[in-house]
Image (spheres, grey):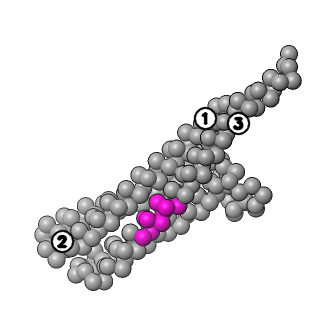
Amino acid sequence: MQTPNSEDDATCASRPNRDTAQETYEKQIPLLYAATNQILSNLRYIQYELPSVKTTPEIREAILKMCGDFEWEVGHIRMEVRRLKDNLGMHPGEEPFRHGMGSDAPKETMRFINDWLGAQLLPMHDLVARIHTAAEHDPEVALIALLLTESATNIINEAIALREALDAIRAALNLVTSQA
């Protein structure tokens, strides 16, 4: 038999976890946006510098394709981050973003983000490796190899930051759902 205060005690006991989770969401979501902004900035830097660097047409085309594909996917990732904010209840009183599109479960949304990001990191890595191999045989390709490697390193660092933010959100979600 519950006393009138026992239910209130249970509600109050779970409130700090919900408050902590909300604080985590409010801290990590901007980090997700910042990481995507930095990824886009690096992709655009590559595209901006590419015309001034001497390289083969094949390498130029491969770089432009990689940048375009990656930018496209970062757009999807940003939409999923917006959806994640909705799923985490960060827009009380507002219309959900693209309601009915995709998954409403935060963990599923985070999986989409991880999958889309990973789908672009692998081709970028392969392209960097291919260009480094070409640079060993053609000194003119060395400058583009340096440009691409530097930007790819920055992109990978931002991808790591993005995944760390998702891990923090996931941990907060697990804490709240384990006590529900």
Please, what secondary structure does the residue beneath circle 3 have?
helix
Q: Which residue is drawn at 32% across and 79% down?
A: 49
- Would you say 158 lies left or right of 168 here? left
The label shown at residue 68 is none
The label shown at residue 142 is 2
In the rendered structure, are the residues bearing label 1 and label 3 in contact, judged by CB atoms less than 8 Å apart?
no
Q: Which of marks 1 and 2 is in front?
A: 1
Q: Quadrant of the N terminus?
A: top right
> Tag 3 or tag 1, which sits nearer the N-term?
3
Q: Which residue is drawn at 23% across and 79% down?
A: 55
* Viewer-closest of 23 and 117: 23
Mark yes or no: residue 25 visible.
yes
Name the residue that disc number 3 marks.
15
Q: Distance between the residues labelled 1 and 3?
A: 12 Å
Q: Which of marks 1 and 3 is in front?
A: 3
Secondary structure that dominates the magenta span:
helix
Question: In the rendered structure, which amino acid carries the disc numbered 1?
Answer: Leu
Magenta stretch bounds: 33-41
Q: Residue at x 53, y 61 (%)?
A: 33
> Tag 2 or tag 1, which sits nearer the N-term?
2
Q: Which residue lies furthest to the top in this view?
A: 1
Question: In the rendered structure, which amino acid carries the disc numbered 3?
Answer: Arg
Please, what secondary structure does the residue beneath circle 2 have?
helix
Q: Distance between the residues labelled 2 and 3?
A: 57 Å
| Quadrant in the picture for residue 79 | bottom right
The label shown at residue 175 is 1
